[in-house]
Amino acid sequence: MNPLAMYVFSRFLIFGSIVDRFNEGGPLMMSLILVCFVMSLFFLAKGFMGLKGHLEQSQKMLRLAIDSSLLGLVIGFLGSIIGLIMAFDSIEAMGDAEPAIFAGGLKVSLLTATFGLFTFVVCRLGILVLRGLIANQEPKA
């Protein structure tokens, strides 16, 4: 197999694995977290672009990025709690449940929490950088 084909195939496998994890985490919750992630990145990009001359717009975008990243984190933990409730419901319904059923519910809970935390951490790094740049742009009193 030629190197280009191997590279494309490996990228496809990685992308497929991410899509599988996204679906396993529950498409609704994961989609909501993804929307928060994209919104946060949009607000950060708009905040960075507004540094030259539109400082108040950058500050507004910073606040919006903070809010949307926190919302992604909270939705991730909400999905985590819902996953745990589903796991306990299945155990209660079956009486003597198999560990695989319980593990499935735990997996859902961990996937949504992980994606929410990822969203928060990545956006928080951008927020810290933007906050520092805004502080450097503000006139000293």
Image: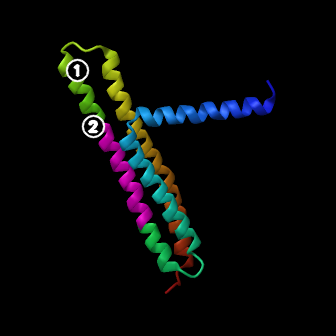
| Pointer 2 local density, CA inside 10 Å: few below 14, some 14–19, many at least 20 | some
Q: Is residue 129 left or right of residue 62?
A: right
Q: Position of residue 118 (x, y in %)?
A: 47, 45
- Magenta range is 64-80
Q: Is mark 1 on a helix, strand or loop?
A: helix
Name the residue located 43 percent from the left edge and 35 percent from the top edge: 23
Residue 89 included in the magenta stretch of the image: no
Q: Which amino acid does label 1 sit on?
A: Ile
Q: Which of 125 and 13 is in front in this view?
A: 13
Which image quadrant: the N terminus? Answer: top right
| Residue position marked by numbered label 1 in the rendering | 91
Q: Position of residue 123 (x, y in %)?
A: 49, 55
Overall secondary structure of the magenta section? helix
Residue farthest along the right direction in this orientation: 2
Residue farthest along the bottom direction in this orientation: 141
Q: Position of residue 97 (x, y in %)?
A: 25, 15
Q: Is residue 135 above or below residue 141?
A: above
Q: Nearer the viewer, residue 92 or 113?
A: 92
| Residue position marked by numbered label 2 in the rendering | 82
